[in-house]
Image (spheres, helix red, strand yellow):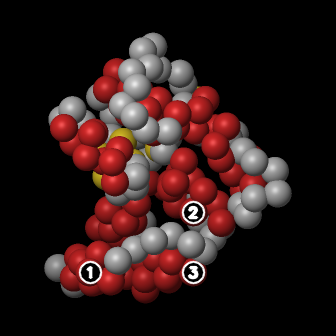
């Protein structure tokens, strides 16, 4: 699983990076994503620093420019090379990834996946999502409603 910076930053802020490790034993980021997340003084910095003990860092062989940030470009390129699931919230990045037929998931989909796999309970899903929103994660009201519907399926 290739992870872009957004998910790591928000889970670091709410102290829930351990959830990633429960979802997948193979979490990979690019050096560009590492640079984006490792900014001293940012909320969640110490949790992110500690997570690098179990997150693999891998540079893509090719780095095509899709007109996105360095982290998004490198994550898409690595996902193409490894045929791994890419977790990304950047709307433009998600659209480009889908146009390249990559398997892409957004943060909330990953949290719902954890619920379906019985890694977390329904109550915890809501707590995590509410904490993410309080920490600055943008989520439209319709997207929030979709998450609630998914929990009741």
> Does the CB distance between marks 3 and 1 fall below 8 Å?
no
Q: Quadrant of residue 80?
A: top left
Q: Report, in whole angstroms, how far the alpha carbon at label 3 lies from the one at label 2.
A: 10 Å
x, y percent for residue 115: 35, 70
Tag shown at residue 10? 2
- On the image, the x and y values in percent for residue 131 come to 55, 79
The residue to which callout 1 is attached is 142
Quarter placement of the N terminus: top left
Observer able to see residue 89: yes
Question: In the figure, 149 relative to 92: above or below?
Answer: below
Name the image quarter holding residue 12: bottom right
Query: Where is the C terminus found, in terms of image quarters?
Result: bottom left
Mark 3: which secondary structure? helix
Left or right: where 2 falls relative to 92: right
Q: SS for tag 1?
A: helix
Q: Is residue 51 visible?
A: no
- Earlier in the chain: of badge 1 and badge 2, it is 2
Residue under pointer 3: 134
Classed neighbour count for the residue bearing mark 1: other residues with Cα under 10 Å, few (<14), some (14–19), many (≥20):
few
- 119 or 93, nearer to the observer: 93
**Pointer 3 or 2: first along the chain:** 2
Q: Residue 32's x, y, as percent?
A: 59, 32
Measured in 3D between alpha carbons, the distance from the residue under mark 1 to the one under mark 2, in whole angstroms, is 20 Å
What is the CA distance from the residue labelled 3 to the residue labelled 1? Answer: 17 Å
* Residue occupying the point 42% across, 15% down: 62
């Amino acid at each position: 699983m290739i992870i872009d910076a957004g998910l790591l930053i928000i889970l670091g802020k709410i102290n829930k990076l351990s959830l990633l490790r429960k979802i997948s034993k193979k979490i990979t980021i690019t050096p560009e994503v590492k640079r984006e997340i490792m900014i001293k003084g940012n909320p969640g910095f110490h949790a992110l620093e500690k997570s690098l003990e179990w997150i693999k860092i891998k540079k893509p062989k090719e780095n095509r420019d899709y007109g996105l940030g360095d982290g998004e470009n490198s994550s898409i390129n690595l996902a193409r090379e490894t045929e791994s699931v890419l977790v990304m919230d950047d709307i433009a990045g998600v659209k480009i990834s889908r146009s390249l037929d990559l398997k892409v998931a957004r943060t909330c989909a990953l949290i719902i996946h954890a619920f379906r796999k019985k890694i977390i309970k329904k109550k915890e899903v809501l707590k995590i999502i509410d904490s993410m929103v309080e920490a600055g994660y943008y989520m439209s009201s319709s997207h929030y409603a979709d998450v609630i519907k998914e929990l009741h399926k």
